[in-house]
Structure formats: C-alpha cells, structure tokens
Image (cartoon, rainbow, N blue to C red):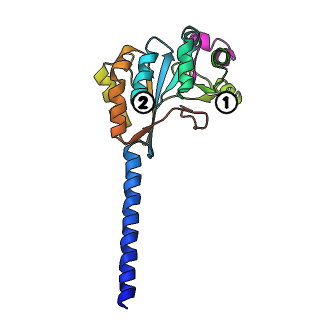
Amino acid sequence: MKRLRKNIIIKSFIFLILITVSVLVVNSKVVNGVESDKIAYITFDDGPTRYTRQIVDILDENNVKGTFFMLNDNMIVFKNVVRRLVNEGHGVGFHGVSHKLSKLYETEDSAIEEFKTCNRTFYNITGKTSRLVRIPFGSKPGMIESIYNKFIDEGFLVWDWTIDTEDWKSSKDQIVSNILYYARDKSEIVILLHENQRTVSCLNEVLIILKERGYDIRPITHDVKPKNFW
C-alpha cells in the first residue's frame, strides 16, 4: 500500500513538472513573437523610394518582415531595392502606375491594365510575379463592383487596411498614437504606412510597441485571406 501511494506521488510530481514546462515553453514563444494569437501586417505604399533601404534595415534590426505595395515607375528606378525585398522575404505587391483616380478608372479595363503592367515590370526585374495589390486610395469608395470583380477574376488579391496612420500629415508622435489607439482590443491588424521620413523616424518605436503588446509581425503572402473594404 505504501509503495502504491509512493508511486502515485512520484507520477503526480512528474506530471506536474511536465505541465509546468509546457506552459513555460508556450509562454516563451508568445513573448518572443514566435507564436501568437495577435497578428500585425505592416504595409508600405508608394515605393520603392530613397527611404526603402532605411525601412528595410529597421525591419531587419527587429527581425520582422513588412509588405511593400510598389508603383510601377519606382520599381524601374530602384531595381536593386525590389530584388532585395524579394530576396529577404518581404511581402511584395503593386500600387499601380498612375496613382491618379482619373487615369485609374478612365475605362472599365484601365485599372486592371495598370496592375498587369506592374506585374510585367516586376517579372522583368525579379523573374517572379505577385498577385498582391493595393488600389490607390483604397478599393472603396472609388472602385465599382464590376472593376473589383475583374481583379478577382484575374486572381489578384486586393488588400486595404484596418489602421490608417495618416502618416502623410501626422507627426511621429501622432502616427504612434494612431496605431496604439486603433489597434486596441484587435487581434489582427493591417497598418497603412507610406515611404517618407516620418515613417522612418517612428518605425522602430512602432515595432517595439507592437511586440510588447504581443503581436506577431508577419509579411502578407498569397496564402493569407485578403483584408479589404468589400
């Protein structure tokens, strides 16, 4: 009887140790951003530009990947930067050619043709293609349903955002505040940033804060369901 009781105590103690170790491992993964229920996609529009290298360097220093929605002519100018984005595993997509609504929606097919042009340019530079797109000024309200359907029929993945940092007019502190305010209580966020000096100046702080709040920062890939206004 004593031996049975002793065996039960030993087995219970071993079981308790195993449970404790498992909890510690899971907690460690979450804290270090390896595994988390909270996901953040950091996206950058209007590149590549003279700021892209700085942005990528900051992402690298924080061991995370971003997603870049690029303009056709800028890809042609900054070919080496485009190749770096691909080689280092960042998400890459397109933001059009003209960035003007009057041009983008000039005809029923003009919008889709802009993004096909981007894809051809991207292929000429990298030997790869992408189906990720972000419509200038968002997929609503400017885009009508028939044009949206053309993108879907062509296999493009239309991405908008859940947080607009308004970095084109906001100060560094305002950008950080916008992200903190609109990210509260959200488990999955898509942050809209643009390639400019204000973004460069606040990006490191943004990444640190998101990690502290438990977000796993990931690049957008083709297997992720698009988040858009439709």
Q: Which residue is mark 2?
A: 163
The three-letter amino acid code for the residue at tag 1 is Ile
Q: Nearer the viewer, residue 138 or 4?
A: 4
Three-letter amino acid code of the residue under disc 2: Ile
Q: Is residue 94 magenta?
A: yes
Asked if residue 144 lies left or right of residue 40, the reply is right
- Gap between marks 1 and 2 measured at Cα: 23 Å
**Viewed as shown, does residue 153 lie left or right of 15?**
right
Q: Position of residue 35 (x, y in %)?
A: 45, 46
Residue 200 location (% of width, % of height) = 37, 19
The residue lying at 37 percent from left, 76 percent from top is: 10
Q: Residues within 10 Å of mark 1 (few under 14, many from 20)?
A: few
Which residue occupies 48% across, 28% down? Answer: 66
Q: Residues within 10 Å of mark 2 (few under 14, many from 20)?
A: some
Can you give x and y, in whole percent of width and height, for residue 105 in the image? 62, 15
Q: Which residue is at the front of the view, 27 or 41?
A: 27
Check residue 221 for magenta coloring.
Answer: no
Q: Quadrant of residue 123?
A: top right
| Residue at the bottom extreme of this rendering | 1
Q: Which residue is mark 1?
A: 152
- Of 153 and 15, nearer the camera is 15
Q: Does residue 134 appear in the picture of this structure?
A: no
Q: Please, is residue 159 above or below residue 50 in the view?
A: below
Boundaries of the magenta span: 93-112
